[in-house]
Image (cartoon, helix red, strand yellow):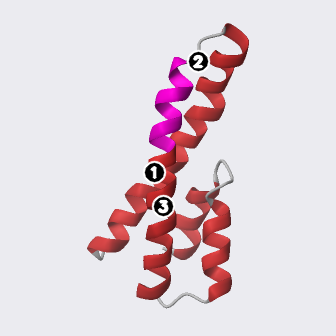
């Protein structure tokens, strides 16, 4: 497998996991148990991974010669909790 594709897969997986942790663990801790610290930490990490994911998607669009429609789908999948896992299976 190509190094760039492998790197994008790793970023994609980490971005998806960080989003799930943010939604499933950090947000309940903040809003149910009044413990906002984890949202700040996980939210910052997720934000960085989100930016890397979108930049990686644009790079993959050019490298793998995706259609513009595919790029839009891949980027939209980044805002769905399990979206990046779908991208890995379908487009990588």
| Sequence-first tag of 2 and 3 | 2
Quadrant where the N terminus sits is bottom left
**Which of the 4 image quarters holds residue 4?**
bottom left
- The residue mark sitting in front, 2 or 1, is 2
Q: Residue at x 27, y 72 (%)?
A: 3
Name the residue tied to disc 3. Answer: 53
Looking at the picture, how far across and down is residue 58, in whole percent? Answer: 49, 76
Whole-number angstrom distance, CA of label 1 to CA of label 3: 6 Å
Callout 3: helix, strand or loop?
helix
**Contact, CB < 8 Å: mark 1 with mark 3?**
yes
Circle number at residue 49? 1
User: Was residue 66 drawn as part of the magenta stretch in this picture?
Assistant: no
**Residue for point 64% across, 29% down:** 24
Magenta range is 37-46
Q: Using the image, determine if residue 58 lies above or below residue 12.
A: below
Residue 86 in the image: state x and y as whole percent: 61, 62
Q: Dot 2 corresponds to which residue? A: 36
Secondary element under disc 1, as helix, strand or loop, is: helix
21 relative position to 81: left or right: left
């Amino acid at each position: 497998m190509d190094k760039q594709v492998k790197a994008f897969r790793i970023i994609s997986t980490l971005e998806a996991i960080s989003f799930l942790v943010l939604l499933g663990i950090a947000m309940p801790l903040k809003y149910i148990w009044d413990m906002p610290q984890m949202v700040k930490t996980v939210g910052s990490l997720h934000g960085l991974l989100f930016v890397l994911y979108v930049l990686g998607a644009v790079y993959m669009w050019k490298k793998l010669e995706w259609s513009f429609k595919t790029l839009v789908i891949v980027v939209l999948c980044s805002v769905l909790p399990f979206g990046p896992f779908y991208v890995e299976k379908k487009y990588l």
